[in-house]
Amino acid sequence: MSAMGVSRSRRLMIVAGFGVGACLIVRPALATSGELAAAVNGYAGGAPIKAGRVKLDIAPLVDNGNTVPLSVSVDSAMTAADHVVAIAVFNERNPQREVIKCTLGPRAGRASISTRIRLATSQKLVAVARMSDGTYWSDTVDVIVSIAACLENPI
Amino acid sequence: MIRCQVIQPHRLFLAIACWVAVAAVAQTDTRRSGFEFMRPDTQAMQRDDTLNPGMLWVRQGEKLWQQATASGAKSCAGCHADASSSMHGVAARYPAWDERTQGPLNLAQRINQCRQNHQQTQPWRLESQELLALESFVGYQSRGMPLAPQASTRLQPHLDNGQRLFQQRMGQLNLSCAQCHDQNAGRHLGGNVIPQAHPTGYPIYRLEWQAVGSLQRRLRNCMNGVRAEPYAMGARELVELELYLAVRARGMPVETPGIRP
Amino acid sequence: MSFTIIKVPATARRGEIIEVRATIAHPMETGFRPGDDGRVLPRDIIQHFSCHYNNELIFSAELFSALAANPLIAFHTIATETGTLRFQWVGDKGFRHSESVALQVT
């Protein structure tokens, strides 16, 4: 959260046009669900989380909530001086908020991970990235999950 | 090339008739694999062997193929050698006529019959991990080939019964397979699109199960779905339904291991 | 015996960013799901995944019940030198599996 962080993040300045004072912005979407916000803010240790630089890719409508492909990529040059240190994903309505927490380093080359998740119902997902300068960035998406039409019993 | 000549009427008629016939055949094959009813993400999963979880079962099947039995008998490889050649096209021909039982047999039953009669060992429980793995591995050797259940007069009464079962209303919801999968395929049932029910990808990795399962498991699930008492696993009726479905899908390419929602 | 599908290119150019995909067979039983008797089935998931490239940790992940069964993790790394990528999975009930894949860097 220092002036050093802002001067290094040239792209941030171009896109956001902010100065040092921008670090206190929290995206409204995170405030809509208490538990989700608590989990995300807990992960960031109370540090401010800015919307942007993170892209959470998931189909808006899924074939089946039991297995949903998901990718998170972060806009970062991944240099030794400036890289993504961690990526985490949180959900709004599953029994548990956490989905995955990844640790990366400059050896990644590209800050991009993919996996497949379970979604109990339609809900919001939040991806958070922690940068090497200590800043946090996020993306929020809404996914619609419909219940299977035919209920089946286990074999 | 334009030639100035008189075109003989009967040749012209023949040419037009052939063209119309070809166009008619091309137009009337409205069969579509369940693959085409899936969203792009799910399709991408099936297309790429490094993304397709069904390949975990194919891998296990590949290992089982090489394994000698507990009874000390030869492995599958001991008789059948390299599966990519000996099993090429085999799964595409099932369900097939079986001399021993004088009736139709699906691939899983055939594998078990081999275990009992040629490997002197216990058959695997239907729907067990091992049996599904071997069925997936053998099915994978036919991937891309057209479904080709053998035409046979001896199978005809079983095929007829399979068709009858497909068209028969059942369960508390009083629905037949045909009502959803012939008459209403492409329409929605809740949030799902109703597919045409072609068995091209079996055993499939079903997202709902988060595992690979057989066509019989899927049929039993469907019967539960219409609140009918499902036939027992391995029942003759289920094999006859499998036979009818295979004939109905004849010519469509095998996709094993398929992914379905 | 745990079955896996691992995608690592056989060869890569030095400095090239490669995508690595690792899938392992595992039910990822959530710990929230009731069994047939109505009682909740105990959790049985893979909790931790890591990848070491010539013994240096290049990626790790903490996994939760929200991941689908037979979990797939895909990530990227820079092909720095010829060597071995070692994958490890650790989970409930003492689950442990590791697998090594060779990478040729030219």
Image: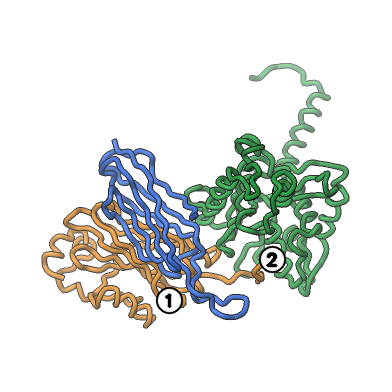
The amino acid type of the residue labelled 1 equals Gln
Task: For the N terminus of chain B, give its image quadrant.
Answer: top right
Instruction: Give me the C-alpha separation between circle 1 and circle 2.
Output: 29 Å
Q: Colour of chain A?
A: orange
Vertical relation: C76 (above or below) C12: below
Badge 2: residue crowd in 10 Å (few <14, some 14–19, many ≥20): many
Is B187 or C86 nearer to us in this picture? C86
Task: For the C terminus of chain B, give its image quadrant.
Answer: bottom right
> Could you say where residue B21 lies in the image, as x and y percent from the top left?
77, 36
The residue lying at 60 percent from left, 36 percent from top is B82
Residue B28 in sight from this viewpoint: no
> Could you say where residue B169 lies in the image, as x and y percent from the top left?
81, 66
> Could you say where residue A45 lies in the image, as x and y percent from the top left?
25, 76
The amino acid type of the residue labelled 2 equals Asn
Residue B214 in sight from this viewpoint: yes
Q: Colour of chain B?
A: green
Badge 1: residue crowd in 10 Å (few <14, some 14–19, many ≥20): some
Q: Residue furthest front?
A: B72
- Quarter of the image where one finds residue C59: bottom left
The residue lying at 66 percent from left, 57 percent from top is B214
Q: How is the image coloured?
A: by chain
- Quarter of the image where one finds residue B193: bottom right
Q: Colour of chain C?
A: blue
Left/right placement of residue B173 relative to residue C63 reads right
Question: Which residue has dot 1 on it?
Answer: A96
Is B17 or C71 nearer to us in this picture? C71
At mark 1, the secondary structure is loop
- Quarter of the image where one finds residue A15: bottom left
At mark 2, the secondary structure is helix
Left/right placement of residue B130 relative to residue A145 reads right
Question: Which residue has dot 2 on it?
Answer: B221
> Could you say where residue B29 lies in the image, as x and y percent from the top left?
72, 45
